[in-house]
Amino acid sequence: MADAVPEPVRILYVHHRSERSGASGALAGLVSRLDRTRFEPHVFCAAGGAAHQLREAGATVHTGSVAAFTHIWASTYHGRRWLLLVRELAWLAPHLAGLRRTLRRGHFALVHLNDSPLVPAAWLARRAGLPVVWHLRSALPEDDGSRRSVLLRRAIRTLSTRTVAINDDVATSFDVGAAVVPDPVDLDRFRPAERRRSKAELGLDEERPLVCFFGYLYPAKGFREFIGAAARTRDVGVEATWLLVGGGVRDRDFFRRARGRALLRLGLTRDYEHEARELVASLGLADVVRLVPYGDTAPYFHAADVVVVPSQGPEVGLPAIEAGAAGVPVVATGTRTGGGVLVPGETGIVADGRDAGSIACAVVELLRDPERARSLGAAGRAHVERRFDAARAVRGLEAIYVDALGRAGP
């Protein structure tokens, strides 16, 4: 009689946001490449764009409320934002009830948390006797000696079986012994391409250099500084087209509805896309700066001459990796070491400061020296091939799952 084939291990990924984001995209990339003979992916998250994205990636999606108590450099409770904590507390009971129900019905062997704020989910998973792999995607606030940072570190050390960070900067910020497993990038989708032809396909001027920003329009991501850098670059006589590829987290219709208007009045949300358009108009940049909604970003990487990642916090994100894969030089702020994402002076430039002037100086330097820009882009591609290959990243996480399951025992 032939030996029975073991059933795949059922993993429940818990994701914290309803809208599509870099975190949901990275999780979708992981889910789509997971070895299905060994692991069966399920996701618990709120209904919305992220749930649809993860379902398309091949996960079985269970929707319900998610309470995520934020404390990262880009999002903390302060001032009126303490009211957001009230909202999370209101969602806590339905979140725990829905997740507990999913855990009981699903017969999962392991829970993977897709970001640091998911403390209630970690507590519930450990109460259910399940090992927890905790994925850290964003660094703590830079005043990391605060009581909230201390408590979050303590929770992670206590509740996590294995901890993973997406880059060296994040791992250093938390200091909880996290293994660094970079987010995977599709090296075929993001690849060096003929830029003039790529610009023409997007309806852009083939002769003008193209400078791009990728991401939702948050102040922490530096969209204001990017627009300011466009103005300063124009003022020194360097012509370029500047694209903000992303848009606001909330669409315009949200701010026309009663809930959106109420949140605006309470100061609990901002229409940053509207603010970006107003800033472009006030600086007279309508013929220089354009806003592009989220969609397939790869064509814009193929067309870009420089990608700016103007982080206002202590790390750089996925756009720097995707730019490297496309062979495009990066101008970054926030990180000092590159965090393993880029190598300062070899695959890109880390600007001297986080302000518009520092960013503009670095961009002008590259636009005036195309040969250096090409050299940085080629080195960036080689760096990404060595460090961010998707198959290698996923196999690394699978090895961590096996280790976590072994630590949990039978």
Image: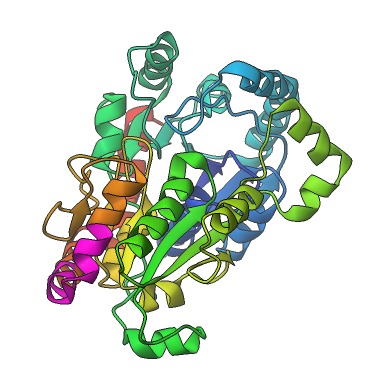
Residue at the extreme top of the image, as rendered: 147
Q: Determine whether 281 is above or below 89 in the image.
A: below
Percent from the top left, x then y, of residue 74? 46, 34
Closest to the observer, 292 or 126: 292
The answer to if 370 sits in the magenta stretch is yes
> Quadrant of the rendered structure where residue 77 is?
top right
Which quarter of the figure is the C terminus placed in?
Answer: top left
Q: Determine whether 2 is above or below 16 in the image.
A: below
Percent from the top left, x then y, of residue 363? 27, 61
Closest to the observer, 13 or 407: 13
Q: Residue at x 78, y 48 (%)?
A: 254
Q: Residue at x 32, y 39 (%)?
A: 165
Q: Residue at x 72, y 32 (%)?
A: 98
Q: Determine whether 321 is above or below 379 in the image.
A: above
Left or right of 239 in this view: 11: right
Percent from the top left, x then y, of residue 352? 21, 43
The part of the chain drawn in magenta is: 362-376
Which quarter of the figure is the N terminus placed in?
Answer: bottom left
Residue 40 visible to the viewer: no
Percent from the top left, x then y, of residue 399? 29, 47
